[in-house]
Amino acid sequence: PLFWIIIVALLPIVFWLLMLPVSARFSNWQAVLRSLGQITALIGMALFSISFILSSRLPILDKIFNGINRAYVIHHTVGALAFIFLLFHPLLLAVNIVSISVVSAALFFVPSINSWQVALGIFALAIMTVALVLTFYARLKYELWKNSHRFLGLAFFLGGLHMFFIESDVSQNNYLRFYMLA
């Protein structure tokens, strides 16, 4: 099962690599940072999706993972990896902007009505961060812990809207768009 999780998480990178020559994606420092920012977003969203599937309690997962407890352990790891990749997405893009302007890089993290597509991503990551901090570090009663997890669905929804509405490779490549939608 772990092999397939890795394949599903990395497959978007194959579509991404087929769009442009690798030399164009890594031609200079700015292109490298932008490319790494895109890669971390694609892997992060794929892992986030997988994490939701692993937490779904589907009977088949019990069989695949030899018990629902094992599926939840993997869900926890996959979710944590998704969060790490999604955190690196804006950080790498902001580092790219620093070469232009430190102020612009800082403002990259501030939601703006003029760039609502970016704001969706900022809100998604903020909600995900708060929900996961509560999940990992707060000692919550089970019902409250479970309800805090529901906000991850909102984060996923807003992150998905961000991914599909921002001008990016996902919006320009049908294979990549449909894969990420699936």
Image (cartoon, rainbow, N blue to C red):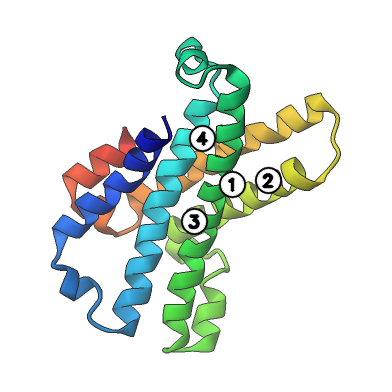
Q: Is residue 13 above or below residue 67?
A: below
Q: Which amino acid type is marked by label 4?
A: Ser
**Residue that badge 4 annotates:** 51
Say whether disc 2 or disc 1 marks the residue closer to the N-terminus. 1
- State the residue in front, 108 or 88: 88
Q: Position of residue 135 (x, y in %)?
A: 73, 41
| Residues under numbered marks 4 and 2 in contact, where contact means CB atoms less than 8 Å apart | no
Q: Residue at 55% across / 56% down in the picture?
A: 84
Question: The C terminus lies in which quarter of the figure?
Answer: top left
The image shows residue 144 at horizontal and vertical percentages of 80, 30
Q: Quadrant of residue 174?
A: top left
Residue annotated with mark 1:
80
In the rendered image, which quarter contains the N terminus? top left
Considering only order in the chain, which callout, 3 or 4, is on the residue closer to the N terminus? Answer: 4
**Disc 2 and disc 1: Cα gap in Å?**
9 Å
Residue 79 in the image: x percent, y percent? Answer: 56, 42
Looking at the rendered structure, the secondary structure element under dot 4 is helix
Report the residue at 59% width, 18% height from top.
Answer: 68
Mark 2–mark 3 distance (CA, rounded to whole Å): 14 Å
Q: Which residue is mark 3?
A: 85
Quadrant housing residue 141: top right
Q: In terms of secondary structure, where does tag 2 sit?
A: helix
Compare marks 2 and 3 and give the one earlier in the sequence.
Answer: 3
Circle 4 residues within 10 Å: few <14, some 14–19, many ≥20: many
Q: Amino acid at mark 1?
A: Ala
Q: Nearer the viewer, residue 75 or 16?
A: 75
The disc label shown at residue 132, or none: 2
Mark 2–mark 1 contact, CB under 8 Å? yes
First along the sequence among labels 4 and 2: 4
Which residue sits at x=43%, y=46%?
45
Point 20% across, 59% down: residue: 17
Q: Amino acid at mark 3?
A: Phe
